[in-house]
Each structure stands twice: as structure tokens, then as C-alpha cells.
Amino acid sequence: MFDLLVVLIPVLPLLAVLVNGLLGHRYSHGVAHRLGWGSVGLSFGCAIAVFLSTLSTGLTREVVVYRWIFGGDLTINLAFLVDPLTCVMMLVVTGVGFLIHVYSVGYMHGEEGFTRFFTYMNLFMVSMLLLVMGNNYLVLFIGWEGVGLCSYLLIGYYYDRVSAAKAATKAFVVNRIGDAGFLVAIFLVFVNFKTLDYTQVFAQAGQLSTAMATAIGLCLLIGAVGKSAQLPLYTWLPDAMEGPTPVSALIHAATMVTAGVYMIVRNHAIYDMAPLAMTTVALVGGLTAVFAATIGLVQNDIKRVLAYSTVSQLGYMFLACGIGAYTAAIFHLMTHAYFKALLFLSAGSVIHALSGEQDVRKMGGLRSKLPWTHALFLIGTLAIAGIFPLAGFWSKDEILAHAFVHRHYGLYAIAAIGAFLTAFYMFRLTYLTFYGHSRVEPHAAAHLHESPAIMIGPLVVLGALSIVGGFPGVPPEGGWLHHFLGPVVGVAGRGGEHVRVGLVVALMGAATGIALLGWGLAHYLYSVRPDTADRWAAEAPRVYSTLRNKYYVDEVYDAVFVEPTKRLGAAWDWFDRHVIDAVVRGVGRLTETGSAASTWFEKYVIYGVINVTGYANHLAAWSWRKLQSGMVHHYAAIIVAGLFILVHLILIWWTGSFALGVAAR
Amino acid sequence: MLQELSFGFPILSLILFLPLAGALVLWALEEEDLVKNAALGISVLELILTGVLLTRFVPDSAAMQFSEQVPWIPPLGISYHLAVDGISVLFVPLTAFLTTLVILYSWDTVRYQIKEYFIALLALETATVGIFISIDLIVFFVFWELMLIPSYFLIKLWGGGVERQYAALKYVLYTLLGSVFMLVGIVLLNLNYHDWAVTHHVEPIYSFDFLQLLTTPIPAERQVLIFWLMFMGLAFKAPIFPFHTWLPDALIEGPIGMAVILAGIKLGTYGFMRFSLPLLPEASKSQSVVTVVMGLALAAILYGAIVALIQPDLRRLLAFSSISHLGFVLLGLFALNYQGLQGGLLTMVNLGFTTAGLFFLAGFLYVRRHSTQLSAFGGLARKVPVLATFLLIIGLASIGLPGTNGFVGEFLVLLGAFSAYWVYGVVGVTGVILGAAYFLWYYERAMFGPLAQGLTQTIQDLNAREKLIAVSLSVMIFWIGLYPAPFLRIMNGSVQALVDRLEHGQMATAQVSATTPHE
């Protein structure tokens, strides 16, 4: 029963994919979306059942479905691992996924390709579930590339828009760079352990040398950096906003991009052996957190701000992993899923209300027109900014506190700066969207409307989760979540060092202060003195334009990697046609005078064989003449001459060596 | 010595000559529809027979199965010796499968000299099957050369390109030139056997029989010479960079059907696995050979992928992608370990569904736009969504997306290469990135974006016959991708035996089901 439930979790959405994908054009949208969210809802139900069972028994179980790839000393099963970490991930993925599917019914209503949308979304659920449920690296990798594919398909959902098509390709290719690193990590694991099963690998991880553990850790990090949009491979994520907003919420905020974090936590046994890899993870996370936040400060597209904010928040999770705060990383992953899904979907509600407008400069004053959306977006903003006692406060504070308590003061400072920036740009976004004068264009204003219940409903649930979602992790380092995940991440013992309550409270106070400071600055710049921000931008034009242009990273990558590769392709193509092939042609031309030989060849070799095979007479009747033309004359002699010379050379050599051999005997 | 199993019924001979006999029947027919139906009927019958062959094949065994042997030229030790093992057996149904699909594809795309076209196609099938089931090297060589004749005419007479004559000739001469070297290699194998047989008073004193040659020790330096001679023949045919320049011409100028066969049936690399590695293990293992071949393999992977990146012609892109994939096959084979050989072999089979499949798709596009140039495409996904979907599925399989057959093969190849020497694996992995880049970039420009200018007229989406082709390919792609167990078990025994031979210098005595990796 348990095994069946586990298998059903990914299989249910898979069935929906098959039915919608193959038969979707035959029935109405109503059937398609019911299959879509219904299957995910059922799969969420199964996930809850599996979770409750795991909670009560406390067992880690493996479910083998079948033997997938094998031979020699390699056996890879299609199998699932159910442990507390899997349970948390499964619940987040199916739960948030379910809400977003329901929301999509309203958001995508009337869109062309409605069924296609749900097919892709369900395929995404399947892949993501394989990713978090697999019991070995390769099942994870199916999911890993599968989510990349779905991301590609959904970014390119409006495929006739050039920008969407380009963004889709970019996302896939950049992800593949990460995937290549991940593959190398898999090879290293196999070479060292002769297996790819987690349980066996982690049981023996202690025997790895530091150098090997570091190598594996860094290769895994390359994979994680690609999938989770960290420096230096984050560039695809902002462009990914070309997809429909529910996609941004589900894939590019709540679930897929957290795969890297999950993967690092899953592999903590290897990272624990490799301090250098840990430090790198922490640095990548910390730098990304601040870097992305600074870009987020000045963007005007509501979804892009949220995208950079996602990159930045993922940075926090990486930072947490890098300092060994694995539970905090998963905790933040969970709360982030709630409030970022909430923010994206509310943003979607705004965009929906404004007939597709995404530029905050054309928003403003929407509070009264979209009261529900406004309230929910505000909850999301408060949660992400880390205002007590919303979900984001607890998880972010735990990361900051962990850094401070474990004397990573530099990282603490970086994280604190990031927190300040986060609060600032999120409130900036809120003020620009919902407060002040309306800058809505007339045609959009005419259709301005609050979203239907089917969209607001899921938002309310996510809003509630964003408020209370942090409580499973309270008190810090000792909440329910910590005890549940303790056996997996193995920090139950390590987290045990006693921290004075005073310090905990002081750190919480500091975190709150930082958040309020960011809020205050945003309030001043965008509510009290709305012209100040522009004046500042005008006073530091270079800084401003650098940020506006995202540090020109895309342009640099283009100039350094993309264009040179294309030029190399063109150069090699020329080389192929004009050098390699020219040698062939040149050899042919040399033998032009040997046309007598070639005629002989044609008559007696080609036609000789044809006659033998029996149907030449027939063919010859109509094709003999055609054969006479062409370039047979140019080439054939070399064959004959070559054969002659070669056979002689070889025979001379051969008999020579024979003779020597005989003489030696 | 390898065990041989005979079947009691000469099924291999039947499979070998059925298409040729069918070709003769076609000759007698006059009416066009009758010719088409007869050709299809014969190819389907052939496919069914090869299916029977596959189901009767004993998996997890290294034995040569369905063996048939009749002396042909006894004084020279040449015999008509047919048999299949785990290395060759899959290519027989693959050939039949692709031929059937090509006949379906050609149904209304070949408009002149229809009878001759189908005759040539069936003759080609016989020759190709012959290559895979002959284990006498001379018989093998005869089929190797015979294959050129129908190929030559198919490219020359039914090709769509202006330079088809040139392309046909280039293909034939390239292969002939290579085979000259290979023939010398084969003769040297025979002479070496003779030398040994005479000193050990063994009968017969001449042999071209693969199984007999296997039992004969070959001095290491002779192995290296023979290896390079065989290499020339196989590398020209495969083709392996830098001997590949016939391939783009043949694939672009020739008809789609021929391109499918040329790109989908990997004769050259098969030859390495069938003959070079087991007969010349010392040479295959030697530092110089491994370094050169692996170097060429990596060069092919990168060169093919990077040149593919900028191609505006889908068929030329596919030609270079083919070169890149052949690099992967070679990388696996010369990793010389289980995963590498298994992955290389599986990848050869896979390319019969992916690269060949992409050529079918190119054909579908060609039928609609009379070109495979990017300039004729743009935003086609809106006009032909079904075609676009299949192009994506098969394309993603070709770049090794997990869940498709391409991944299983590529993963095993890279794992094998990495285990052999990590640098091979790491460089090979970059091919994975470039693969995604060239395919998706092309796809983006051809299928996505706004509809190309001048594309106002209606374009039909896939018709039933085309859908049948695309669906059959996709079924194979997902089957091997998700549940490759039957295929892996078929290969297992022979791959293991080859690994043992490479490691211990001799073919382990194979026992049916002895190496079953069941729990």
C-alpha cells in the first residue's frame, strides 16, 4: 500500500500528461484543466499519506520500480527514496503546485494552447517529483533535465514571440552547462563508489579523500548553480519571465530553481568532507544574494524584480548550505515557496487586471481597485522582507543567526546587506504598484478588474501559509522541522551547542531593524518624496545605468562565449569545405590525365559488379550514358594506382618481416 | 572459442535474401501501385522475420546464434558463414525497420523510376543485412562493397541536389579507397592465420572465418599494422573525422531515404566492434592507438557540434551532428570497458532512431518547403504543430535528454570514457552542451518566432503515413529510454565477452545465461 502510494505520486500527473497530450485536442478545456489540477491534487493527497506514514514510523524506505540501466558492475534502478527530506520536498512541490494549477485555470482562461499548458505543467510536476524522490543520482538527473525541458517548453509557451523563443533556448543551454558539471559529479561518484544509490554512497562518503570530496562537491555545485540560477549561471532566470506568470511562480520561483539547494542538502555527507567546497557554496550564495538584489533595485518590470529577488533568495539558501545550516536552507526553501509563489501569483493578478501590462511605471494606485490582490501582495512583501512574525522572518533570521553564531561574520554582513536591499526593493515594488497616483494607461484602466475567485482562492491559502508557514521552524534550531529533518541532515547533534537566549533575541532584533530600515527608505523614496529616487539616479548615472543593464553580464557572456563559438563554427565550416575537402578534390584533379585508367575502372569494376548482381542490363539501358559523365575520370585512377602501390608496399614489408622472423628462428 | 548455436532453420539466409528476391519480383511487375505495395509487403515481411529473430535470440549470452555455415572457396578458407551475437543482432531488425519506414516515406515523394528505386532500396537492404550477419571476413567484405552499388544509384538518380552525381561518386570512391586498405588488412589476418596453422599443423591452413581467426594469436606489432589498415576502411565508411567530407555531400545531395540509411546504420563503427577490437586486442589497447583514436573521437565530437552550430541547412547540420555522434560512439568503444562498449553499441542502435528520424523530419519539411534551408522556415510551429512536436521529441532524443534512448547511450559512453581516463569524459561532456546549443538554436529559428515572410499559404501538417513514421520512431525512442532492459540484456553477453577478451586476451567461453545479471 505504502509502495503504491509512493509510486502514484509521480504517476498520477504522468497519466494526466499522457491523456491530455495525446487526446487533449478532442475534448474541451474544462476536461483538460480538471485532469491537470485534479491529478496534482490527488498526488498531493498521496504525498500527505506518505508523509504521515513516515512521520509515525520514522522509517526511511526505498521503493524499487524496475531495473533501468545495468550491465557489468553498474546497476541503476528506477527507484524512490522516502525519508523526511523527500517528504518535505514532496509536500512543497505538490502542495504549492496544486495551488498554482488551480490558479492557472483562471489565469490561462481563454488562452490559445490551454491544454498544452496543463500538459507541460503536469510534465513538470512529474519531473520535479522524480527529482526529489529518486533514490539515486540518475533518477534525480531524469528529473533534473526534465524540469529543464518543461521550463524550456513553458518559457517558450508564447513561441511566436522572438523574445520568448530566445529566452527558452537560453534557459535550456545555460542549464545544460550546469548539467554537464553535474554529470561529471555523477561519474566521479561512480568511479569512487561503484554505485549511484544514495544510501550506499553516503554510508561510504567518510572514506573519500578531501581532494575527491572537494572535486565532487564542486562539480555538484556547477550543476546546482545552473539549475538554481546562481552566479555565474543566473542569467537565464530573469529572461525566463517570458513564460506565463503561473509558470514563473511554480517553476522559476517555488520549485524547480530550489532543486540545486535540495541536491546540495541531499549530498551534505559529501560536502561535510570538503570544507573548501562548502566555503565556495557559501560564497557563491552570499555574493549572488547581494549581486541579484542590487540589480533588483532598479528594474521596472514587476516580474523581473521578483525574478532577481528569487535569485537573491536562492543565494541565501546556498549560503545556508555552505555554512552547514542545512535545515535552515530547507526551511527557507519552504517558506520562500509560499511567499514567492504568493508574490508571483499576485503579480500575475495585477498583470491580468491590467491586460498584460508588466511595467511598474504604468501602474500605481491600484490598492483601491484590486483590494484582495493588494492585501495579498503586501503579505508576501512583509514575509520576504522578514517582518516578524511572518514566514520569511523565521527562516531568514535563522540563516543570519547561524552565520553569526558560527563566526562567519563576513557572510553575516553580506547577508545583512542583502536583507536590507530585499526589504527596500520589495517595498519599492509595492509602493510603485499599489500606492501613489495611477499611471495606468487609459485602455488598460478601462478593463481594470479584480481577479476571479479561482485565482484569489489559491492566493489566500498561500497568504495564510506566508503568515504561519514559519512556525514549524520555531524556535530557531529547535523547531518541529529541525527534529523531523535531523536524521537526514545529521545536524541534530551539531546544532546542539547552546546559544544564549539573549543573543538569539538580539539577532532577531537586528534582523527586524534591517528590514524596517529597508522599508523606511522605500517609504521615503517612493511615498514621501517620490522625486528623490530619480534625482539620485541622475546624480550617479554610471552606477544607475550599470544596474539598469544588469552589470552588462549578458553582453559580456555574448562577446566572450557565444560569438566566438559561432565564429569558430564558421571558420571550421570554411576549413571543412576549402581545406579538407579541397585535398580530396585536389587528389582527384592530379589524376585527370589518367582517364584511360578510369574508363577501364568504370567499365570493368563498377559495371562488372553490376552485371554480377543481375539487374544491370535493365539499369544500363537508361543510365549508361549518365554514368559516362561526372567525375569518374578524375578519381578512379587513384583507386587503382593506390591499390597497386599499397598492396606491393605491404607485401614487401610483410615478407621482409617474415624473412626476418624466419631468420631469427 | 565462442560457442555457436544453430537454429535448425536457415532463418538468417532467409532474412538475407528475402529483400533481394523481392527486388527480382518487383522487376517483373509493371503497375506502379503494385510495385509500391509489393515493396512494402516485402519489407514488412522482412521486419516480421527479424522480429522473430530477436525474440528467439537468447539474451545474456555471448554465443554466436542462428549459425549457418557452407564452404564457399575451401582452398582459401572462405565459407558462407552467417551468425549473429549480441553485438550484431540488433542491427538486423534496425535495418528492416528503417527500410520499411523509408518505403513508407518514399510512397509519394519518389515520383520517377519508381520501380527501379524500390529495387535499389531492397537490394541495399540485403547488402546491409549481409554486412551485419556475415562472420566470414570475405563474405563481409563482399557485402560491404555490394552495398555501394545500390547506394551509388540511389544518390545519383534520385537525389534532390544539383551536385548529386558528384556526391554519389565521392561516396563510392571514398569507401572504395578505404576498403582497399581494409582488404589488405583482411588478407594479412588470413596470412597470419596461415603462418600459425602451418607451424601448429592445424587444418584448414587458410581461413577468413572470424571465429577461427579469434583463436589465432597475432603478434602485437602485426596487430598494430592490421589495425590501422582496418581503421582506414572503417573510418572512411563511418565516417570518422577527418575522413568525413563525403558525408555532408551524400546526405544533402542524395534522397532522404538514402540519407536515413547512411545516417542511421552505423557500419563503420560496427566494424570496429565486430572485428577490430576482438581480433586485435593488443593493438586496440596500445597506447598509441587509444590516444589517436580517442583524440579523433573527441575532435569529432567538438568539431561536428561546433560546425553544426552555424549551419543554415538542416541536412548539413544533421550531417555534422552525425559526425559528432560518431565521435561519441568511438569514445565509448575505445574506452575499452564495459560501460563504454555497451554505451557505444547502444548509441549506434540509437542513432538509427534519432539521427535517422531527424532525416525523416527533414524530409517532411523538404516536401513542404522544397528546401531544408533556414530561410524557408520560421515560426512553423504554428502551421505544422504535429511536425514541430515530433521534431522536438526526436531532436531532444538526439541530444540525449533523459527519458529518451539518446541519454542511456550517451550516459554509458561518457561514464565509460570517464572511467578510462577522466579527461576523455570531461571533454566529451562539453559535447552535451554543444548538442543542446546547435539543435535548440536551429529549432528556435525554424519553428519558433513569427511566421516567416512569404509563408502565407497553407501548409499541411503531417499526413497519416508521416505520422506513422514519426510515431514508430518515438515509440522506440521512449522504449529504449525508459525501459532499455531487453536491449541491454541482448547485448550483455557479447559485450562482457569482449571486455574479457580485451582484459585477458581471450574470449571467455560463453555460456548461455551464465552471466545473467538477475537478482
Image (cartoon, grey):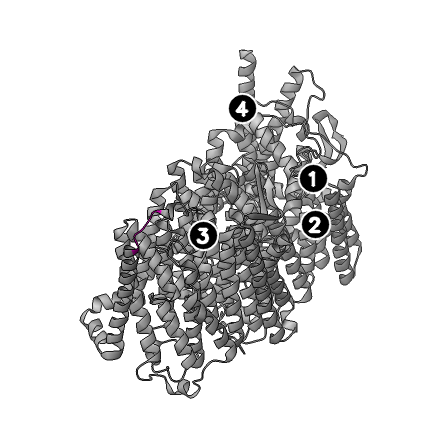
Q: Amino acid at mark 4?
A: Ala
From mark 1 to mark 2, how far is it between C-alphas?
A: 20 Å
For the view shown, which residue lies furthest in the right direction? B8
* Disc 1 to disc 3: CB gap under 8 Å: no
Which of pointers 1 and 3 indicates the residue nearer the eye? 3
Where residue A26 sits: x, y (%)?
66, 73
| Chain ID at mark 4 | B
Which residue bears the numbered disc 3?
A483
Q: Is residue B281 visible?
A: yes
Q: In the depicted view, which residue is nearer to us: B113 or B55?
A: B55
Q: In the depicted view, which residue is nearer to us: B110 or B360?
A: B360
Q: Is residue B160 visible?
A: no
For the view shown, which residue lies furthest in the left direction? A539
Where residue A376 sits: x, y (%)?
41, 75
Mark number, residue B96: 2
Q: Secondary structure at mark 2?
A: helix
Quick check: is B338 in the magenta stretch?
no
From mark 4 to mark 2, how far is it between C-alphas?
A: 39 Å
Which residue bears the numbered disc 1?
B59
From mark 1 to mark 3, how far is it between C-alphas?
A: 50 Å
